[in-house]
């Protein structure tokens, strides 16, 4: 079984297409289950954010599953497969591991180094666990990717070098409005991105923060965390009329802020939703500036911070990712050969027991002490004969072609690692191999 990734992101697709493909809620759960029950798929997880939609799967075949996942993405999004396929990327085995680690580290984000992707990957992991589509392979891989991402943020300056999308948006807002301290900010929505937006506004020195959400209780809770106030959703138009800076990120499928709700004047709107929360026609209003994911993508999310420190931080993160990928693949290859080593040692132990039983039946007069000595001697001989090849095959298994050595061992000794009796002594055998 191997890990496969099929997806599209801001690097390969326009935001308009990402809007159509992005799934959430019940649609996300349905896609997850449809992938999981596809032929050849043993485990599945879906990462769906404003910048990417990726399907991770553990598979026993390649081309058939790639075609099936591509078809499912087309069906669930309503985008014809021939329009979708040119924007898809596919990573398999080693490249899939490297891609996930890079995603978790923030190297593949629109704003390199942003930390929110870790929470988004964690949410995808939790959903797959809750829905029962995850197994040991994908669970361990994703957990490792999260650990790698945390390490990158802890050991490098990538947090300072790569701001979040909200941070970039506020930088752009300051270019339009001037210093944002003292301005009135309106946050539309109360989800995780809205919470991040409100917290970022507070850290930037904005004290007048209003939160509007369809579920008023959630707006109240979020507003309380930043010392702001909550307003009913029905008052959205009135609050827009008083706001200088608006950040919107809801889960709505239709436009939330229409052009007729916005008064022409100096005003900055940051639309971080997918699909759009703010009607693009707002851009036509005098004095109004609208920045959304598409315009940030087209502008490369440039904040003017691409200095030597940023380059150095990114290089450091790439080094950590390369190191962690190599370590993961090495351990994973070594683990693959363990069942074969166990089967070999188990088979040898069975042969020893059978031959000792035959000796006792043929020479029943052997005394107990002598019988024990013979038994121990035979076992030591077999252990010493097998120790070097089993240690060596584990070492060789860590190389890229390591599977071939285990396969040769299975062929030479006619081993079947899947037989239950072959793995019952695994702890004892591992102790023998590692000593």
Image (cartoon, rainbow, N blue to C red):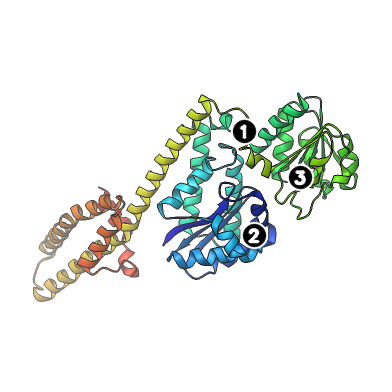
First in residue order: circle 3 vs circle 1: 3
Please determine whether, in this image, residue 155 is positioned above or below residue 411: above
- Disc number at residue 40? none
User: Distance between the Cα atoms at labels 2 and 1?
Assistant: 31 Å
Secondary structure under badge 1? loop
Residue depth check, mark 2 versus mark 3: number of the one nearer the observer = 2
First in residue order: circle 2 vs circle 3: 2
Secondary structure under badge 2? helix
Please determine whether, in this image, residue 313 is positioned above or below residue 137: above
User: Distance between the Cα atoms at labels 3 and 1?
Assistant: 27 Å
- Disc number at residue 302? 1
Task: Give neighbour class at mark 1: few <14, some 14-19, many 20+ (Cα, 10 Å).
Answer: some
- Disc number at residue 190? 3
Task: Give neighbour class at mark 2: few <14, some 14-19, many 20+ (Cα, 10 Å).
Answer: some
Residue depth check, mark 3 versus mark 1: number of the one nearer the observer = 1
User: What residue appears at the point 20 percent right and 66 percent down from the top-left corner?
Assistant: 412
Relative image position of residue 267 (x, y in whole percent) = 82, 33
- Quadrant for residue 354, please give it: bottom left
Residue holding disc 2: 28
Relative image position of residue 287 (x, y in whole percent) = 83, 33
Can I make out residue 41 in this image? no
Judge from the rendering whether residue 431 lies leftward or rightward of residue 272; answer left or right.
left
- Quadrant for residue 79, please give it: bottom right
Relative image position of residue 300 (x, y in whole percent) = 61, 38
- The one of 158 and 331 positioned closer to us in this rendering: 158
What is the quadrant of the N terminus in the image?
bottom left
């Amino acid at each position: 079984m191997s890990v496969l990734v099929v997806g599209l992101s801001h690097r390969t697709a326009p935001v308009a297409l990402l809007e159509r493909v992005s799934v959430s809620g019940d649609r996300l759960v349905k896609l997850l289950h449809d992938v999981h029950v596809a032929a050849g798929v043993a485990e599945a997880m879906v990462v769906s954010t404003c910048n990417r939609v990726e399907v991770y799967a553990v598979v026993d075949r390649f081309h058939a599953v790639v075609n099936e996942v591509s078809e499912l993405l087309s069906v669930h999004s309503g985008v014809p497969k021939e329009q979708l396929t040119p924007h898809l990327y596919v990573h398999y085995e080693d490249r899939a591991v490297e891609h996930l680690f890079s995603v978790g580290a923030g190297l593949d984000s629109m704003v390199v180094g942003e930390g929110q992707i870790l929470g988004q990957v964690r949410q995808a992991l939790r959903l797959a666990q809750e829905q029962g589509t995850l197994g040991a392979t994908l669970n361990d891989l994703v957990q490792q990717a999260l650990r790698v991402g945390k390490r990158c943020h802890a050991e490098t300056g990538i947090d300072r070098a790569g701001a979040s999308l909200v941070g970039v948006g506020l930088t752009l807002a300051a270019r339009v409005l001037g210093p944002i301290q003292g301005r009135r900010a309106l946050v539309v929505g109360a989800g995780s991105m809205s919470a991040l937006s409100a917290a970022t506004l507070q850290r930037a020195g904005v004290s007048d923060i209003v939160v509007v959400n369809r579920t008023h209780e959630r707006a109240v809770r979020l507003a309380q965390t930043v010392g702001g106030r909550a307003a009913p959703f029905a008052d959205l138009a009135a609050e827009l009329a008083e706001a200088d800076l608006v950040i919107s990120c809801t889960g709505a499928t239709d436009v939330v802020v229409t052009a007729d709700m916005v008064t022409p004047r100096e005003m900055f709107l940051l639309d971080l939703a997918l699909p759009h929360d703010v009607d693009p026609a707002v851009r036509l209003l005098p004095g109004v500036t609208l920045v959304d994911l598409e315009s940030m993508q087209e502008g490369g999310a440039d904040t003017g911070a691409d200095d030597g420190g940023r380059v150095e931080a990114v290089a450091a993160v790439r080094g950590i990712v390369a190191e962690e990928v190599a370590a993961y693949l090495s351990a994973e290859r070594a683990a693959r050969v363990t069942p074969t080593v166990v089967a070999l040692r188990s088979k040898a132990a069975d042969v020893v027991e059978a031959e000792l039983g035959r000796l006792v039946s043929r020479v029943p007069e052997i005394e107990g002490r002598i019988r024990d000595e013979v038994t121990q001697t035979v076992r030591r001989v077999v252990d010493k004969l097998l120790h070097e090849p089993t240690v060596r095959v584990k070492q060789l298994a860590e190389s890229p072609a390591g599977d071939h050595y285990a396969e040769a061992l299975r062929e030479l000794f006619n081993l079947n690692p899947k037989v239950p009796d072959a793995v019952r002594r695994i702890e004892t055998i591992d102790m023998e191999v590692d000593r």
